Structures are given as C-alpha cells and as structure tokens.
C-alpha cells in the first residue's frame, strides 16, 4: 500500500543518492532538499534527482543529520508499522537470548527504529526518544511497548546530550506504571541492583553484559576492575578470582558495588574510591601485580576534535595495565568511543604493548552484545570495542 500523496518529500543530491543506495541510513543537510514548512519529526518520501522514490525517512531540522532512513518502500509509517518493528525486535531477542529477561529490546537504527532506544530490566523498560520523530510519538510507542511486553512500568531517560543536537530538551521521569528504585536484574549468575531513573545511561551498561560474563571466565588470582561503575565486571570476576579490587571515582557508584557484592555473598571484593588514572599510576609505583585486569572507561572521544587526546588516554591506561600484569595475565580492555574505530584502538594497544616491552596475544575481539545489532553500512552502530589480551 503506497503512502498518502500529501506526504512531504525530500530531494537528494547525486551524492545523497549514492550514500542512500550504499546502505548508509543518514543523509546530511547538504545532500537533502526539504521544504521550509516540513516540520521536524515528519515522515518524508525520499526522491532521487529524477523524482523516483527511494523510500522514506524521518526529518530533522536542527540536526546536521537531516534524514534518517525508515524504510526503502512507500508503506504507511503508522501505528501498525511501529507495532511490527517493535514485535520484530522483541522476537529477535527471544531467539538470540532465550530465557533472558534483561537486554536491549530496541537498538535504534540497528532495529529499523532510528532514534529509539529501549532497554529491558525484567518487568521494567527504560526508553530514550532521541530525535523529534520518536519524541512526537512517545505516547504511541509507550502503549505499543506495554502491549508487546506486558511490562509493569516504563522509565523515560531522554536526558542524553544527543537530544540537544536535535533541538530537544533533556527529560526523564516515569512514563507508565510504577518503577521501584533500585531495580534488581541478573547477568548470568550475578544479581545487580541499579537505579533506572538516576543511574548512568539507562541504569546500567547492558551493552557490556556478555563481556562481563566473558571476563568472569578469564578471571583468576588478583584481579583489578577500573572504572567499575556498579561492578558488572568486578562481580563476575569475584566468582573465580581470589580477590578483586574495584576502582570507581563516584561515591554513589562505589556504594552500589559494595551493596551488590553483599547481595551476591562476595567477601573478596575491595572497592577503592579513586580516579582510575591515579590508581594505576600509584599501583605501578608501588610495584603491585595482578593476574586479571579490566579497563572499561567512559567515552574519551566525544567528537572528532577530541580523538588525539582520547588515543593518548587509552594508551596511558593500557600501558600501565600491561606493566601491572603478571606473565600469563589477562587484560580485558574496552572503548565505547565511536569516533575511535577498532583499527585505531588496536593500534593504541599495539603501541602500549611495544612500550611495555611485552608480547601480547589477542584471545578475543568482541563488541556489544547480540542484543545491540550492528547495521551493515552504519559503522556508528559498532561503537563498542572490547579486546581480551594475554601477556606472554
């Protein structure tokens, strides 16, 4: 069924057409002509220079990204469309993660729903409406999510800085039902309590859920977890390591780690409230040694201009970690900066190993969990890099 004839249009340049047909779903302002009266959030028909329809996209006015592809045909982008896309995303998670109850339910462009993030923590959902098209439809989307999942409550965490680029204010609150604080969820054999309304991102870092569990399998001896947040890595390692030192600069997050350690019955977790850079430097000066180290820092590169400084930061912490590891020790190291791609991050790790004068094996190259599908053609959806390394 075609779209209605009064649907506004966007005309692409030849460069925009090339980008669209190559599979990249974002079209920037210089490559898309849209009438001045088309509001932000509207669905537009995308035309090539000859007037042929290439599909449909969400229109943004404030953002440099003028169009975000929604579909390659002319089907109506209505309530039924969103219902079907949400149902497809939910079905994929049931297939990939049978029996799991905490995961990313909708991953924006990766699930054909640009600007919409939905994380599930058991009976509760956390949403982010990051572009005008999703913000305008948030009540509809909330209704559809309740119908699809039967959730008891939905938190709106649309307080991401990304919204400012779209001309949208930061917002957060309870969107549906009631949500306890904290919410308890499981990652493998570990229980974690997090605040969905006040924690970082959507309460926790579900993109690292599978990597948390993998790190736990490698853990042994003296283990160190830097930038620990709520202890996702530290508590998995505590199941196998003799002792885990969790380094976290936030007092509130450090308290979470301690509470989560008690919740799981771990008495081998020491929480240190300190800047991770300072801790690593002092540990090296003191001659401390570890058998397993995890580095999971926040994004060092917020934009392209900050890439050089980010690379220096990544090199410093990884160099110090390699110098702290015993021979045969394991380093699990991550970067969530999408401006630093995997090749650049691997180059930093190679330079750090050279300066540490050690030979390093790559045991695994990992990314975000399977509930964060990467859209082929949109490398920005492959933002998380995680290497498992072993010092020979």
Image (cartoon, rainbow, N blue to C red):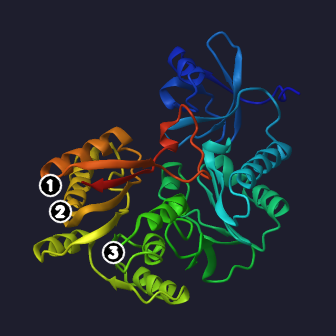
Distance Cα–Cα, label 1 vs label 3: 22 Å
Q: Earlier in the sequence, mark 3 or mark 2?
A: 3
Please identify, in this view, whether the residue under mark 1 or under mark 3 is nearer the observer: 3
The image's mark for residue 356 is 1
Distance between mark 1 and mark 2 Cα atoms: 6 Å
**Tally of numbered discs:** 3
Side (left or right) of 389 relative to 122: left
Q: Position of residue 303 (x, y in %)?
A: 35, 47
Whether tag 1 and tag 2 are in contact, CB under 8 A, the answer is yes
Q: Work out whether mark 1 precedes mark 3 in sequence or the reverse, and give the earlier one.
A: 3
Task: Residue at 60%, 45% (x, y): give it.
Answer: 373
**Residue 114 in view in this figure:** no
Of the residues under marks 1 and 2, which one precedes in the sequence? 2
Q: Secondary structure at mark 2?
A: helix
Per the rendering, the mark at residue 323 is 2
Q: In the image, 156: left or right of 206?
A: right
Residue 168 x %, y %: 56, 55
Vertical placement of residue 348 versus 268, above or below: above
Q: Which of labels 3 and 2 is toward the front?
A: 3
Which numbered tag is attached to residue 221? 3
Res. 222 visible in picture: yes
Badge 3 marks a residue whose secondary structure is loop
Q: Which residue is more in the foreground, 305 or 110?
A: 110
Circle 2 packing at 10 Å, graded few (<14), some (14-19), many (20+), is many
Residue 342 against residue 146 in the figure, above or below:
above
Look at the image and tell me in which quarter the C terminus lies: bottom left
* In-front residue for pair 211/65: 211
Asked where in the image residue 226 lies, by quadrant, the reply is bottom left
Decide: few, some or many residues near mark 3? Use Cα within 10 Å; few <14, some 14-19, many ≥20.
some
Quadrant of the image occupied by residue 138: bottom right
Q: Is residue 332 left or right of residue 185?
A: left
């Amino acid at each position: 069924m075609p779209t209605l004839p009064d649907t506004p249009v966007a005309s692409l340049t030849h460069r925009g057409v090339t980008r669209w047909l190559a599979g990249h779903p974002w079209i920037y302002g210089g490559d898309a002509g849209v009438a001045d009266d088309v509001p932000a959030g509207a669905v537009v028909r995308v035309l090539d220079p000859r007037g042929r329809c290439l599909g449909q996209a969400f229109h943004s006015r404030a953002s440099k990204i003028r169009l975000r592809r929604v579909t390659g045909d002319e089907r109506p982008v209505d309530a039924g469309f969103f219902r079907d896309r949400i149902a497809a995303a939910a079905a994929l998670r049931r297939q990939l993660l049978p029996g799991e109850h905490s995961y990313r339910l909708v991953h924006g462009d990766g699930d054909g729903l640009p600007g919409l993030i939905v994380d599930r923590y058991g009976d509760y959902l956390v949403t982010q409406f990051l572009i005008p098209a999703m913000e305008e439809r948030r009540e509809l989307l909330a209704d559809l999510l309740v119908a699809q999942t039967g959730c008891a409550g939905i938190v709106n965490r649309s307080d991401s800085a990304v919204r400012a680029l779209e001309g949208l204010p930061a917002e957060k609150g309870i969107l549906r039902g009631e949500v306890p604080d904290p919410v308890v969820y499981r990652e493998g054999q570990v229980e974690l309590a997090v605040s969905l309304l006040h924690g970082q991102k959507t309460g926790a870092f579900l993109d690292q859920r599978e990597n948390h569990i993998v790190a736990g399998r490698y853990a042994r001896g003296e283990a160190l977890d830097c930038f620990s947040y709520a202890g996702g890595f530290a508590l998995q390692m505590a199941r196998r390591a003799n002792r885990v030192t969790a380094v976290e600069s936030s007092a509130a997050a450090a308290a979470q780690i301690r509470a989560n350690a008690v919740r799981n019955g771990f008495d081998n977790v020491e929480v240190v409230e300190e800047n991770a850079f300072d801790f690593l430097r002092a540990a090296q000066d003191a001659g401390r040694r570890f058998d397993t180290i995890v580095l999971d820092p926040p994004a060092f590169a917020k934009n392209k201009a900050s890439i050089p400084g980010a690379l220096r930061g990544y090199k410093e912490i990884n160099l110090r970690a390699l110098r702290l590891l015993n021979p045969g020790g394991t380093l699990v190291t991550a970067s969530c900066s999408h401006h630093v791609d995997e090749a650049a991050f691997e180059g930093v790790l190679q330079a750090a190993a050279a300066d540490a004068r050690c030979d390093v094996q790559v045991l695994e190259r990992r990314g975000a969990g399977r509930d964060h599908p990467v859209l082929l053609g949109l490398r920005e959806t492959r933002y998380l890099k995680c290497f498992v390394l072993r010092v020979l």
